[in-house]
Image: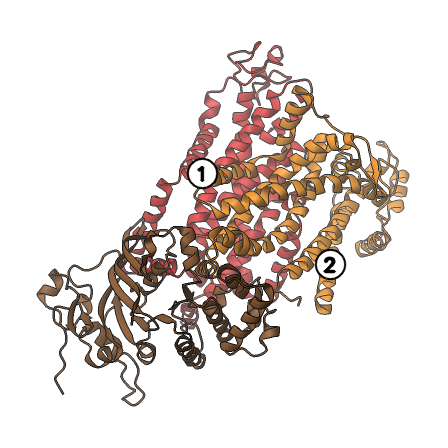
Amino acid sequence: MLRYLVFRASQLILVLIVVSILVFVFTSVMGNPVYLMVRENATEEEVQAAIEYLGLDKPLPVRYGIFVKNALRGDFGKSYVYHQPALRIISERFPATIEIVIVAMLLSALVAIPLGVYSGAYPKNFFSKSIMTISIAGISLPSFWVGMVLIFVFSLKLGILPVSGRGDVGVFLGIKTSLATVSGWRHIILPSVTLALGSLATILRLTRAGMQENMRQDYVKFARAKGVPRKKVLFGHALKNTLIPVVTIFGLQLGGLIAFTTITETIFSWPGMGKLLIDAINSADRPIVSAYILFVAVMFVFINFVVDILYTIIDPRIDLK
Amino acid sequence: MNKLLEVKGLKTYFHTFKGTVKAVDNVSFDIHEGEILGVVGESGGGKSVTGFSVIRLIDEPGQIESGEIIFNGTNLLKKSESEMNKVRGKEISMVFQDPMTSLNPVYTIGEQMDEVLLLHEKLNKHERRNRCIELLKDVGISNPESRLKNYPHQFSGGMRQRVVIAIALAANPKLIIADEPTTALDVTIQSQILKLMKKLVEEHGVALMLITHDLAVVSEMADRINVMYCGKIVESGYTREIIENYTHPYTEGLLNSIPDIDKDKSKLNTIPGIVPNMFDLPKGCNFSPRCKNCQDICLEKEPKLTEIGENHYVSCHFPLRKEAN
Amino acid sequence: MQVQVKTSNALKGSAENSKLKTFLSSEFIYNYKRSPTAIIGSIITIVVLLTALIGPFFTVQNPYDMSTIDLSDAYKPPAWIEGGDSNFILGTDQQGRDILSAIVYGSRISLIIGVAGTLFASIIGITLGLVSGYFGGRVDALIMRMADIQLSFPTMLIALFLMTFFGRGIGNILIALCLVGWVRYARTVRGETLTVKKKEYIEATRVIGLPNFKIISKHVLPNVFTSIIVLSTIQVGSFILTEATLSFLGLGVPVTRPSLGMLCNNGFKVLYSGLWWVSIFPGLYIMLIVFGINLLGDFLRDELNPKLK
């Protein structure tokens, strides 16, 4: 267990070093931030002053050192647009993003797993075949397009759901969330459905594949030879074996969902970190972009860690090494 | 002794895109109560399919085409699926080839044993637990109380096969079908498991259908032997009769390919050729391409299974006759 | 299970006896003919490719040529809706551009990026995979660590960051797609290379002094060929989607060469004014293209390499 923790921690550090170098290279070496600082017809002195202010006159390794030192203190500089520390803005936007991610995750799990299990258990029946074809259509859909269609149908044509924004925020268990208000729920439906669709299809397909794989195993046949009815074999023996890897898939999907919030939030003007990132990119707000990347990197390593732990808890065969 | 199982004209075919494989083609045999029947032959000969046909666990694209499987006076092929579930595990149970895969990795041994008892026996929780412990003791597992909580991966291959045998015995079945029960095990473990099985079936008065490719194993265990080749029984009879007075050239080949420690080690006899393509069986006798006594008629006409001695049947145009001695 | 194993062994045995190739192809074709989804997938793919190839000869406009566009044609709905113009079957946008023409030209960009990106990514990935698997050691460790780190991030996010730093442009998209797409090829090829390397006949070829290059090209590549085909089919579809998403976010193709994603971006601005056709049709076409490719990819995976997920 201790060895595993050390291994994970070293992995986290490795990832962060690589990511920080990349972020540093891209933000500091490529492009010239000086011209974002000074006015258009700046004099030599003004440019020079900006260079010194940004520390660009120092050699690269020194600049990287400064970058890391500041980053460790959570200081990625102030946003050019909001004039506030970048990390603070991101953490303010974080709950809104987690909200739609959680709703989307639950939505896709509740729909995908039962359908995946069913179509894996009865692969030959018409309903299962339809599910599979529809799921291929599901992974072929561009999520921004789904969002547009949903807005057009439910907000513009039918007028039953709001077009964009987050709605009212209520306090629930001390946390500010739109899940505590009716208006919040009305606002969250479309973005989370849009977000859920891609991962829904993926989870469905992987659950089905796992189910079919397990049904071919000898222990399923042995259980049948014991006189266990087919249904009980499917939903007792095969299902438990299928659900174990689904946990891993969930972890991976969680990362994917966070990535795709950039699109969903942009379409629905949802004030989370995804929209913040796209806005920052469009306004060349580099502190926000670098803070976002490192924030997300830490988050992903953390998610992987949690998934690994969960996996060992539910799978009796695995010991942490 | 009474006939426990009587199989008549069983045909189990596999319909694939390439054509039909007649995995079991018109096979008839019977098993008496408490008897050990050995079914031998090379792999692909239809032995396992025969075993699985008896408890009707044939997966697609396989299908039982025709025949009768009469068990205790009733035809199993006429039973519904839910009626079959009361036969499987209760009346007829199975032991599979690979104990590494036949136990579910995510349930404990106790849970998997309990499942059979729950399905087939009217026992309360406490009684079921005691029965499980007793069964594990019977199959030679030490510390059964604590072992119940273990998962399959915490057992060695031989131990797992003992657990599988315990599960097979749990509901006091009348027949156990063991499909190559020792093939996946280490040689040293093999004989232990076989001895255990023989002891247990004798103690419990259970009949055993022992499917194996190893004629040596069968000759030590079985009361009677069916030799199968390409989905058909080519020779059947009492074990001694088969070993001493075999008449089918295939049986002779199988017997000669058993390595004999006492004899010259430099030469191991084998049957020439390989099992023919099941999609494209030869005309006439299936064994003709590999048979040293092959004549014209063997390439034309399929031999019939005929009785040549007491309970000794063979399907060959030119059965071997040993010099009387 | 055992029963099935035995029949499949019987199949394999027979295949080795007779001609392996005819057997394989016949099974493949046999299943293909019985798979409606595979047939529909190929039809869609062929139609999409033909449209991109010869479609521009039949469109009413060339969306790149401003002289063919008339601002007075702007805001026309699809032909079957009142106020529609039979010249512009799917309507026009706010500048008078014919949506159908824009889709036909846009699909060219999308397809070129999808196919070229896959091609380049596969070349890089296969090379790195072979190097990694064949030489092992530090090179292998380095390449695979890189792959590990990359795989812990969603593809979409990496592509997004790369485009942030590269800036818009078709070339830049291709570079970004290569950088995100090589990993899966490298992993598959490395795995296969390791398996092949262990086999005795490879040992034998080394003993007789065959150069590394020859060993790789003769023995490893044929073994991974089917996996690469399957991966590539799926990759083209996912690259088209990635490009569309990047372009929709304004981080993809330049405005002068609108791909289907860019058209959606353009249409999204006017969606709220009720001009739904400007964005919905290009998006629908993206789905059609990717759907066709994925149907085909799904079939190929099931047939050629079910282990690939």
Say whether disc 2 or disc 1 marks the residue closer to the N-terminus: 2
Query: Which dot marks residue A12?
Result: 2
Q: Where's residue B23, x and y in %?
A: 29, 59
Residue at 71% in and 38% down: A262
The residue wearing badge 1 is A126
Residue at figure coordinates x 59%, y 43% from the top left = A112
Amino acid at circle 1: Phe
Secondary structure beneath label 1: helix
As drawn, the label of residue B194 is none
Colour used to depict chain B in the structure image: brown
Instruction: Please give the name of the residue rendered at 47% of the width and 43% of the height, measured from the top-left corner.
Output: C297
Instruction: Establish if C279 lies above or below B218.
Output: above
Could you tell me how far apart the alpha carbons at marks 2 and 1 are, in whole angstroms?
A: 46 Å
Q: Which chain is orange?
A: A
Quarter holding residue C248: top right
Task: Give above or below for B216 relative to A141.
Answer: below
Left or right, C203 with respect to A47, comes to left
* Residue A66: quadrant of the picture: bottom right
| Farthest residue, direction bottom | B262
Crowd rating for badge 2 (residues with CA inside 10 Å; few <14, some 14–19, many 20+): some
Indicate the chain on which mark 1 is placed: A
